[in-house]
Image (tube, rainbow, N blue to C red):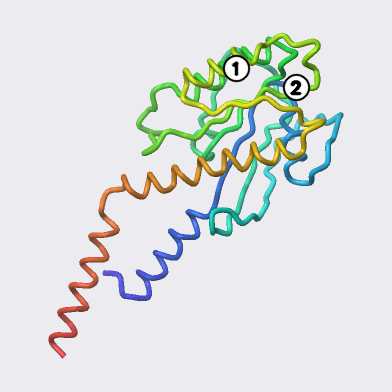
């Protein structure tokens, strides 16, 4: 049985966990995943960025009255395979930023495959109480003169799969990149609140049980 100190400790652990936000930035090779991430974290733009190594970046930020511990997963360069497993990412991430290059139609097809994988019916070993937050990003808006993917196509893909959508340029729009990340983080925080509401009342029952036990003890003293 939990004593009052153990119960308080568990409550604090749950609170701390709610302040941990894990975000995966996925997309085809050369779409600007790392450029977007670095732009958000440092406000700097890196034009040429190629890495075969996956990275997890950390950032502390204050949002909606909470001190958040943000972790951003960047898989680095990856081949655009028709089929691959996202099992580890689906387990780890609270939300996803899916990036494509508006001047490269094949990257849009890859982004579509990623979204379908995230939105496909969940198996028992990776079932979520609330659907993951997903934001589809059409990057490289500064290359609109060689556009291969229309804005309407991106918007439709997002709407059909219950995702947010935006187009921007990591190269030229620092503020828009920041607002994009804030937008998906806010969606994740909303999902956290929904999970708390839908969570079985086990924690409430435990609190009631503890109160009853301590209440009985107080009466017997």
Relative to residue 14, is residue 34 drawn left or right?
right
For the residues labelled 2 and 1, the Cα–Cα distance comes to 13 Å
User: How many other residues sit within 10 Å of disc 1, few (<14), some (14-19) or many (≥20)?
Assistant: many
Q: Residue at x 46, y 25 (%)?
A: 162
Q: Quadrant of residue 152?
A: top right
Q: Residue at x 79, y 46 (%)?
A: 42
Q: Is residue 154 above or below residue 36?
A: above
Q: Position of residue 60 (x, y in %)?
A: 65, 55
User: How many other residues sit within 10 Å of disc 2, few (<14), some (14-19) or many (≥20)?
Assistant: many
Task: Please state, as top left, top right, bottom left or bottom right, where the C terminus lies in the image.
Answer: bottom left
Q: Position of residue 94 (x, y in %)?
A: 51, 40
Q: Residue at x 58, y 26 (%)?
A: 165
Q: Is residue 170 above or below residue 219?
A: above
Q: Is residue 52 visible?
A: yes
Tell which circle, 2 or 1, labels the residue nearer the N-terminal end. 2
Q: Position of residue 101 (x, y in %)?
A: 72, 19
Relative to residue 170, is residue 122 drawn left or right?
left
| Residue toward you, 210 or 52 | 210
Pointer 2 residue:
141
Pointer 1 residue:
154
Q: Position of residue 213 (x, y in %)?
A: 19, 74
Quick one: SS at disc 1?
A: helix
Q: Quadrant of residue 208?
A: bottom left
Relative to residue 127, is residue 145 drawn left or right?
right
């Amino acid at each position: 049985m939990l004593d009052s100190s153990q119960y308080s400790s568990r409550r604090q652990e749950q609170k701390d966990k709610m302040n941990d936000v894990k975000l995966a930035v996925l997309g085809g090779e050369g779409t600007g995943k790392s450029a977007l991430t670095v732009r958000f974290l440092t406000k700097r733009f890196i034009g040429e960025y190629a890495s075969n190594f996956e990275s997890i970046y950390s950032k502390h930020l204050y949002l909606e009255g909470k001190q958040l511990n943000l972790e951003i997963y960047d898989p680095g360069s990856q081949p655009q395979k028709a089929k691959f497993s996202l099992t580890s990412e689906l387990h780890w991430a609270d939300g996803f930023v899916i990036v494509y290059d508006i001047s490269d139609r094949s990257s849009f097809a890859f982004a579509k495959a990623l979204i379908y994988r995230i939105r496909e019916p969940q198996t028992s070993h990776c079932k979520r109480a609330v659907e993951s937050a997903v934001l589809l990003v059409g990057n490289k808006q500064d290359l609109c003169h060689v556009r291969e993917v229309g804005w309407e196509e991106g918007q439709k893909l997002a709407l059909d799969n219950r995702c947010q959508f935006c187009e921007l340029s990591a190269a030229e729009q620092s503020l828009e990149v920041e607002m994009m990340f804030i937008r998906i983080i806010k969606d994740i925080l909303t999902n956290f609140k929904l999970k708390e509401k839908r969570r079985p009342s086990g924690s409430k029952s435990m609190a009631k049980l503890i109160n009853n036990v301590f209440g009985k003890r107080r009466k017997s003293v």
